Image: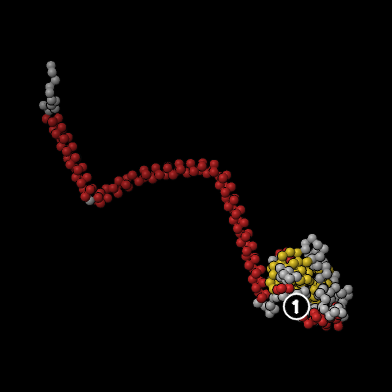
Amino acid sequence: MAPPSSRRSGFSKKAQYSLFTGYLLAGAGALLGLGLLALSLWQPAAFAPVRGVASDAVAPVGSATAAARAGSQGVFEAIAGYFNAGRQNAELRREVEIARIRLAEAEGVKAENARLRGLLGLNEGTTRPIAVARLVGTTATSGRRHAYVNAGASDGVAPGMPVLSERGVIGRVLETGRSSARVLLLTDSESVLPVRRAADNVIAFAEGRGDGLLRIRLVNLGVNPLKVGDVMVTSGAGGYYRPGVAVAVIAKLTPDGGIGQLVAEPGATNYVAIEPIAQAAAVAALEAPERGESGSAATPRPQPAPSASPSPEALETLD
């Protein structure tokens, strides 16, 4: 028997109503969907509350997923950082070394500026320097202690002129050329400089020892009034140096004075100021017996230290 050309739900009214209801609901759903689509295109903001409710509903799940994803990325980054730690540490060490070099250079520039400001302060004083020159070298390996500056007779420099840094006395000019001069340093064994203690009028002589230190010999022998740390300054006696310029600091006491350490170290000095002789007339009077028969003045040279205490008349002459 051939099958029927169309299937029928049967003679059950319930089945027929169910099928009809399904078609009706499907059609109503399609119409509702078309209506909602048209409304979303015409008024997109109308569904904002619905989207907010949906977002709130899925937010906890999204947060958990994001946390898991971040944790997995942190694990991978930790593994990658472990393998890259050596290279990164080497780069950081190089950067730190470069930063230290730049910092040291900046400190050097700062110190140089301070020294130059000190020399400018010398220009602003009562005694105007003849020239400001660079200390180009010293005789470190020689038995004598000399230095050389790049200023000479063409700049007005003459033998006997004191040479000062921003800290204190360096020495005095011994010989001059046209554009350079040789300086007798305080530490030379032939250098003798009248000094006094800065706090009072304890008078002494600062003699060079040739080893970078000065021997401070008191004029009045007896109880040694000096103390470690006392600052010795020029007394102005002799006429070469103006009084009150720092010379040395007492580092060790001796029966007749002490051992002084230079305030102005030549090896750490770049620029110096060459000042005129403080009392040219007094120096000329001291050099008068040394004039030759031709009448020309002899080159100033340091006076030897006295072997005993000078007489009161000699002290009056020095003062």
Q: Is residue 18 above or below residue 256?
A: above
x, y percent for residue 10: 12, 26
Q: Is residue 177 above or below residue 33?
A: below
- Is 98 placed left or right of 242 in the picture? left
Kindly identify which residue carries mark 1: 277
Q: Is residue 194 visible?
A: yes
**Quadrant of the image occupied by residue 117:** bottom right
x, y percent for residue 224: 83, 73
- Is 122 placed left or right of 215 in the picture? left
Question: Residue at 80% of width from left, 79% of height from top?
Answer: 283
x, y percent for residue 265: 73, 66
Q: Is residue 205 visible?
A: no
- Is 10 placed left or right of 276 in the picture? left
What amino acid is labelled 1 in the image?
A: Ile
**In this view of the protein, which residue sits in the foreground, 94 or 292?**
292
Quadrant assignment for the N terminus: top left
